[in-house]
């Protein structure tokens, strides 16, 4: 083992790593889609007028949020087969990421709903709109822009947590790097390339989210053009 | 095997792992607090070199995954002749990663101190260093503690990752017991419970207490 960076080796493994990157992006995308829906379910649990549902919902969210994703992955992956449910590593990973980040997204949704001024709700009440109509026409169009930055941040967050999936054997980028490194017994290039790929994907994404956030604030009149 | 006999047989091992987890938690929290204060203030510097360094650091550590950084510290640094012990590598990686997030919180906190305070210090002819030390810094704590508390809970969860670089912490022990006994529900369930208990009944109340203390220090009572 020497400390020299070997370009030939780096170029040799690069195509393999780029293919694995597609898997990482796919995992992040699917995980995010599940999380977005699960977040809605938790939000529903939070907003139903039944007290006991609220309480149970809060405890579940609290529990999922304060335990590590890694052990949750192990739990789903190793425990479900004991009850006769055998799922592939991919499915387990997606379910766990969806549940874990769903709790975070439910908080984002809640914040967005609370960000809609109270007077808007009262006006709907005064105009005798049905609650369905209130949500669809008045509240959601105003809440969605508020939720965008938070939702975007968690998209990047999920993307950065996908390497954890390699621990249960999902063949994503980090898994590929470990496999290549183990095969050639050189970890310098694979892990560095992984880091660089993450940087090149997540920094533009973060900048893009910041831009959307600014545009949303502009459109809502929270900041003025001159302030930019 | 009932759950109680499982606990009596493997409970001590798990508690041993929990102690390591708490050690990692404490060490990396100290490291991340120091790093975030330093880099958060550097980020506000007018000197482009200092500011640029801090920005590059923050973007780099926030842009890549913690697990990648951890493996980089543990498996790649030996190539450059720096061999870190697994525990040290874990603490350094977590501390530096969360330091980058914390630096942004500190920056936001400093910017959120009311403008009148800056002007007051200026009017009293304080030097910039004294202004920072005596006026601004003491006031940022009530502002930054709530987001920092969230970050610290995230840090507790992130400590589980050090098991992957062979630190014998709670996660590592749970995996180990799982591979011996195949009682997955018991050992991972217990591990999840222990993390939950640490977070819910020890870490979070402690952080709330700090928030109340900080608010009281600057004369803003908080219930």
Image (cartoon, rainbow, N blue to C red):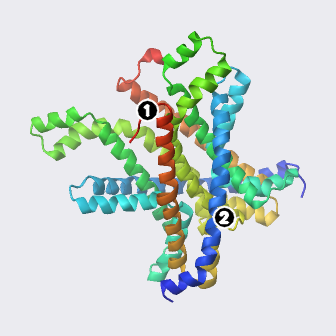
Q: Quadrant of the C terminus of chain B?
A: top left
Residue A129: quadrant of the picture: top left
User: In this rendering, does residue A22 appear at all?
Assistant: yes
Query: Which residue is found at the position 69% from the left and 37% from the top?
Result: B57
Of A144 and B150, the residue lying toward us = B150
Q: B15 or A106: which is nearer to us?
A: B15
* Residue B37: x %, y % from top left: 64, 36
Residue B146 seen by the camera: no
Q: Which residue is mark 1?
A: B220
Residue at which label 2 appears: B20
Percent position of residue A140, x then y: 28, 40
Q: For mark 1, give the secondary structure.
A: loop
Q: Is residue B49 left or right of residue A54?
A: right
Q: Residues within 10 Å of mark 2 (few under 14, many from 20)?
A: some
Q: Is residue B140 left or right of residue A224?
A: right
Residue at the image position 16 percent from the left and 36 percent from the top: A122
Q: Is residue B151 left or right of residue A151?
A: right
Q: Percent from the top left, x then y, of residue B167?
A: 70, 65
- At a point 67% along the width and 21% down the height, the residue shown is B129
Upstream in sequence: badge 2 or badge 1: 2
Q: Is residue B60 above or below residue B176?
A: above
Image location (x, y in percent) of residue B22: 62, 60
Locate residue B31 relative to residue A208 in the image: left or right.
right
- Chain where mark 1 sits: B
Discs 2 and 1 carry the same chain letter = yes
Residue placed most toward the observer, A22 or A195: A195
- Label 1 Cα crowd, 10 Å radius (few <14 / some 14-19 / many 20+): few
Disc 2 on helix, strand or loop? helix
Which dot, 2 or 1, sits closer to the camera? 1
Against B146, residue B136 (above or below) is above
Give the chain of mark 2. Answer: B
Rounded to the nearest angstrom, the CA distance separating label 2 from label 1 is 37 Å
């Amino acid at each position: 083992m020497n400390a020299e960076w070997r370009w030939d080796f780096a170029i040799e493994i690069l195509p393999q790593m780029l293919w694995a990157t597609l898997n990482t992006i796919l995992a992040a995308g699917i995980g995010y889609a599940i999380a977005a829906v699960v977040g809605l379910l938790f939000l529903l649990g939070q907003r139903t007028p039944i007290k006991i549902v609220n309480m149970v919902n809060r405890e579940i969210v609290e529990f999922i949020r304060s335990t590590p994703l890694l052990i949750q992955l192990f739990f789903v992956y190793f425990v479900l087969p004991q009850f006769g449910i055998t799922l592939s590593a991919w499915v387990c990973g997606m379910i766990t990421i969806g549940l874990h980040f769903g709790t975070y997204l439910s908080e984002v949704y809640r914040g967005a709903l609370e960000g809609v001024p109270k007077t808007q709700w009262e006006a709907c009440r005064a105009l005798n709109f049905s609650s369905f109509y209130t949500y669809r026409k008045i509240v959601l169009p105003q809440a969605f822009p508020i939720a965008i930055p938070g939702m975007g941040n968690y998209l990047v967050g999920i993307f950065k947590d996908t390497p954890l999936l390699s621990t249960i054997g999902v063949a994503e980028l980090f898994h590929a790097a470990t496999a290549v490194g183990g095969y050639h017994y050189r970890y310098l290039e694979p892990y560095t390339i992984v880091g660089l790929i993450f940087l090149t994907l997540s920094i533009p994404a973060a900048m893009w989210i910041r831009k959307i956030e600014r545009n949303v604030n502009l459109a809502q009149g929270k900041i003025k053009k001159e302030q930019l | 095997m009932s759950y109680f006999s499982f606990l009596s047989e493997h409970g001590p091992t798990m508690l041993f792992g929990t102690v390591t987890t708490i050690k990692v938690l404490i060490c990396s929290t100290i490291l991340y607090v120091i790093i975030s204060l330093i880099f958060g203030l550097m980020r506000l510097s007018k000197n482009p070199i200092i500011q640029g360094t801090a920005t590059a650091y923050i973007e780099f550590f926030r842009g890549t995954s913690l697990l990648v950084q951890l493996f980089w510290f543990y498996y790649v640094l030996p190539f450059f002749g720096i061999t870190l012990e697994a525990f040290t590598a874990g603490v350094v990686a977590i501390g530096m990663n969360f330091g980058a997030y914390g630096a942004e919180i500190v920056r936001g906190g400093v910017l959120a101190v009311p403008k009148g305070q800056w002007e007051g210090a200026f009017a009293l002819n304080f030097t910039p260093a004294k202004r920072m030390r005596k006026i601004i810094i003491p006031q940022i704590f009530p502002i930054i503690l709530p987001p920092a508390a969230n970050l610290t809970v995230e840090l507790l969860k992130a400590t589980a990752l050090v098991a992957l670089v062979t630190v014998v912490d709670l996660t590592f022990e749970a995996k180990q017991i799982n591979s011996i006994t195949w009682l997955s529900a018991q050992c991972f369930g217990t591990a999840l419970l222990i993390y939950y208990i640490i977070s819910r009944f020890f870490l979070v109340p402690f952080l709330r207490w700090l928030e109340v203390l900080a608010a009281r220090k600057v004369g803003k009572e908080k219930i």
